[in-house]
Structure formats: C-alpha cells, structure tokens
Image (spheres, rainbow, N blue to C red):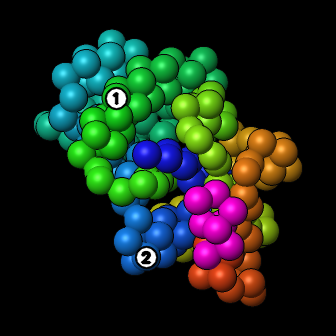
Amino acid sequence: MKRIGLTGGIGSGKSTVARILIAMGYPVYFSDDRSKSLTDTHPEIRQGLTELIGNHIYKGNQLDRSALALAIFSDEALRVKVNQLIHPIVRLDFDGWVDEQNHEIVFNEAAILFETGAAERFDAMVLVTAPEELRISRVMQRDQCTREEVVNRINHQWTDEQKIKLADAVIVNDDVQPLIKQVELMLTQLA
C-alpha cells in the first residue's frame, strides 16, 4: 500500500483536494480532524497539555482550542513541546487507520508534514499551494478571524518555496487552474 502525504499551508485548499480524492474513491485520513478528536479524548494528550499549560486549557471534556492557539502562537518553545506531544499519537492513529484500509493508495491530509519531519514516513508528498492573499482571505472567512491572526499562523509554517523543493507533486489551487485535472495528473505521476 502506497502512503501519500497531502500537505499545504493554511488556506491552500488541501481539504478541497482531499474531498476530490475521496469522491474518486481514495481513502483520506484528515490529521487535523483526528487531532482535534484525540486532544479531547486521549488521556496522554490531556495530561500533557494540562501539565504544559494548566488545567484551564480544558473546559469540561473539551480542549479550549482558542486558548491553545493563543498560547502556542505566542511561545515558540511551547508550540514545539505541544507538537512533540500530539504528533506522535496522531501518527500512531494514522497507522491504525491505514491497517483498516484496503486500497492500493491512501492519503494523509495534514498541514505541517514537512515542518515536523513526518514527510519522511510517506512514499510520496503532494503539496497544495495558493497565492498568499487568497489563503489569507479564505482563512479569515472560514475561521472568522483577523488578517493579523492568519498572517501569524502562516509565518509559523514553511513557505511554499521551501516545500516545493521537497514535494513529489504540486497542485495549484488558485481558483483559476482546474483542480480535478491536476489531481488526475498527480495520481498518474504517483500511482
């Protein structure tokens, strides 16, 4: 079974590409969605976040995601520690998910596969890119946040230029070039 990482910066449209892949019959693991579920339910993550940040980081049985984002995007050392806590658990969850699939190719959609070194675990890497202003606009609309908040999050990720050098295929999601044709070409290249 071929494992393919599907990545891109915030607002690039990697989830849109993932939905196209699902419509084509390919299994896609959504790391961010699973991570959100695991941060609420996994005892090791809960204990680690509570130790790192404090009991206030959870409200009942749910992580206060706004408080976590505020904390990690203003403290680089804390962001690294939180990633070191959560990412290995999400990777194990992905491995278990892969074991349940019966397709020759599976995809893992995640924002920071290159930044965390997780890209090395995949047979190939697909990068979704988009112009920065379009990304900012998409995220502001989607998350109801300020331009400054989006730019801050973008600045904590690698640039497209850094990731393009490492990607096996690049899909440009600029609302001009047809996505389905690019996805079909990528599948031909990587199959």
* Nearer to the camera, 9 or 54: 9
Magenta segment boundaries in residue numbering: 184-191
Residue at left offset 25%, top offset 24% = 46
User: Residue 54, relative to residue 121: is it above or below?
Assistant: above
Residue at left offset 21%, top offset 29% = 42
Mark 1 lies on residue: 92
Q: Residues within 10 Å of mark 2 (few under 14, many from 20)?
A: few
Examine the image and state in which quarter residue 38 appears: top left
Question: Taking 93 as reference, is 28 left or right?
Answer: right
Instruction: Return the disc, 2 or 1, that comes first in the chain's sequence.
Output: 2
Mark 2 lies on residue: 24
In the image, which is nearer the foreground, mark 2 or mark 1? 2
User: Residue 174, relative to residue 78: is it above or below?
Assistant: below
In the image, what residue type sits under mark 1? Answer: Leu
**Residue 126: where, in percent of width, then height?**
65, 55
User: Residue 73, relative to residue 136: is it above or below?
Assistant: above
Secondary structure under tag 1 reads: helix
